[in-house]
Amino acid sequence: MFATVAAAAILAVGPGGSWRAALDLADGTLRFGVEITADGQGGRLCNGAVCTSLSAVRVRGDSVILEIAAYAASIATVRRGDSLIGYYHNVGNRGPRTIPFRAARGRWPRVQASGALLGAWDATFTTDGRTSPRVLLFNRDSTGLTGALISNTGDYGHFWGSMDGDRFALAHFDGSFVYLITGRLVGDTLRGVFHAGLSTETPWTAVRSSGRPHLRAPTAMTTADTTAPFHFAFPDVHGDTVASTDARFAGKVVVVDIFGTWCPTCHDAAPVLVDLYRRYHARGLEIVGLAYEVTGDTAQDAPLVRRFRDDHGIPYPLLLAGVSDAEAAGATLPQLHGFTAFPTTVFLGRDGRVRLVHAGFLGPATGARHTLQVDEFRSTIERLLREPAP
Amino acid sequence: MSRRTQRIVGAPPVRIIGLIAALALGPARARAQLPAGIAAERATLAEWLSNASVSPRAAIATVDVGAGGVAIPGAAGARAIERDGSVWLDGAGRARVLPAYRAVTVGSVTVVASGDPGRRRLTVFGPPRAGPPPEYYPYDSTLVFTGPLRTIAPLPHRVLTPDGLDVAAAEVGSVAFRLSGRDVRLRVMRIPEPGTEESSLEIYFRDATSGAGSYPAGRFLTLAPIGNGRYRADFNRARNPFCAYGPAYPCPVPWAGNTIASPVRAGERYTAH
C-alpha cells in the first residue's frame, strides 16, 4: 500500500519545468530547450535565450503533446520514467515528416566557446558541385555559444549551441524550421555540414571574413523602374483601398515594407520600422506595409495582419497585397524586378520614385550587422527627407 | 545494420563501390521487430492519408494550368490561369494569385498550386476520405544497407516526384550492394523540395515484386545520411508514389537501369482495390 502511494505520487508529477531536448536527425543531434509552465498547459521551445511559444501542451495519462499550431506541427511524446520520448511531426509538400525527439529534465549545460571561433566567417556552401555564399557569425552570451547564418536574402534566425574541443554544433528549431550547423575548427578554416530537416545535408567550408563583401549587397538584389512614381493600391484590413496616389503620401518620403506575418525576419524588422516612423514622421516620413499572406483570402489573412499590427504597435497602414511567394508577390508590383526576399524595404523619394530597394533584413541575431543596417535605414531616410518637395 | 561490413563489388570499369549487404547474418536474423521509428512514420502516414485535406486519397484531379487557363474541376465557374509565372484564380470573386504549395479553399474544393513557372500545376481535392492504412511487407533487417554514394558530375534530368510533379532534378551518383547473390546498382537523384532548404536523395526502383505484391510502376526510397559521406538505404521504408493512392496523379516513369531482378519483400505493398 505504501509503495503504491509513492508510485502514484511520482506519476502525479506534471511535465512542468525545464527539459533538455533533442531531435535526432539522420546524421546529427539538434539540441534545444523545452520549457513547460508549472500548470502544464503551455510552454516554449528555446534556442538558448530565444524562445518560441507553444500554442498548447496537452497531457493525457502518460502522453504529452506539444503543439505548434501556427506551423501545423506537433511533438507527440510519452513519458518513460521522467523522460519524454516521441516524434516531431510536420507536413511538407509531399506528406507528413517525422523526426525522433527525446528530452530529459533539466537544461543543457552552458559551454564556453573558444575565442578562436568567435566573429564573422565567409562560408561557401556546396550542393552537387554548385556553390553559394553564406556568412556565419559566432558570439557568446550568458547561455553559451550563439550564432547566425546569413544568405543573400537574410538570416536564418538565432542559433544556439556548444563547442567541444574543436567541434561545434549550433541549432535553430522553432517548431517549423529544423536547422543544425555542425563543424570543426581546423587551423584557420572551418569545415562543416548544414543540416536542414531530417536528412538534407549541405557541406560547407569557411574562412575568416576579410572585410570584403562576401554576399551580394542587399541593395543590389532587386531593381526598380524609376521612370514613374512607384504605384500600389491595395485594401487595408478594413477593406478600404489605400493607394500611392492618396493625399497622405504626396510630397512625403515613403518607406514601403513588403512583408508577411509568417516571416520571422519580418517580425524582426517591424520594431525597427515603428521606431523610424516615430522618429521621422513629423519631418515627412510615411510608412506603409504590404502584407503577403498565406492564403490570399481576406477573411483568413486580415486577422493575422491585425494581430501583427497590434503585437508590434504599428501606427502606419498595413495593406492586404497578395500571397506569400516571391513570384506571386513580384507580379503584383510590376515596377520591381528581381523580387526575391521577404521583407523587402522600398524607399521612395518625395517625388514618389524609388530611390533604394533593400532586399531581406538582418535580424538582431546578426549583432553589429543588424545595427549597421538600421543605421543605413536612418541615414537613407534623413538624406531623402532633405530632398526638396517636387 | 551496424553488424554489416563493407566491401567493394563491381570492379572497374563500372567502379561502383556500394552499399554492401553482409553475408554473415543468417536467416534467423532476417526478421526482426519493426523499429519504433518506422512504426511512427507509418502511423503518421496512415493518419494523414485518411484525414488530411490534401491527402492523395482526397485528390480529384491534377491539371496543368497553362497560359490558356483551365476550369477547376468541382469548383463551378472557377478557372485557373498561369500569368507572369503565377497561378491566378478567376471567376470566384476578385481575381487573385494562388500561393505555391499552400492549400486554398475554392468553393467546395481545396486546391494547391505547384510546379515551376511555365509548368504550373493545380491539384484539386475533395473532402478527406478515410481508408485502410497502407500495407507493408514484414520488416526485414537484411534489407538495410549502408555505404558510400558513388558520386558523378551532376547530370540534370526532369523527373516526376512521388506526387507526380515535373521538377528539375540532378542525377548525383549511384549506390551498389549485393542482394540475393546478385550485384545491384541503383541510380540516385537529388530531388528539390521547393521553397525550403531541403532536398532528398531519391531512388525510384522496380523489382521482382513490382506488379506482383508491390506497386507496378515502382517505389521510392530516400537515402539517409549517416556521416562521413555514407548513407543508409532501408528498403523497409520503400514507399509508393502518390499514383498508387488515387488516379489523379501522374505516375513517374521507371528510371532506366533501376530494376532489381530479385524480389524486394520489404516496405510498402500494393493491392489493387
Image (spheres, coloured by chain):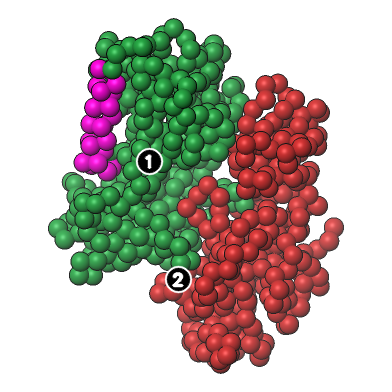
Chain colours: A green, B red
Q: Nearer the viewer, residue A335 or B1?
A: A335
Q: What residue is shown with label 1?
A: A220
Residue B124 inside the magenta-drawn segment: no
Instruction: Give the residues in magenta.
Output: A365-386
Q: Report the residue that reaches farthest toward the front.
A: A227
Q: Residue at x 54, y 87 (%)?
A: B15
Q: Quadrant of residue A334?
A: top right
Tell me where residue A79 appears, x and y as whole percent: 44, 53
In the picture provided, is A32 more to the left or to the right than A75? left
Q: Residue at x 58, y 68 (%)?
A: B155
Q: Which mark is residue B226?
A: 2
In the picture provided, is B185 more to the left or to the right than A345? right
Disc 1 marks which amino acid? Ala
Q: Nearer the viewer, residue B127 or A59?
A: B127
What is the magenta segment's predominant secondary structure?
Answer: helix
Label 1: state its secondary structure. Answer: helix
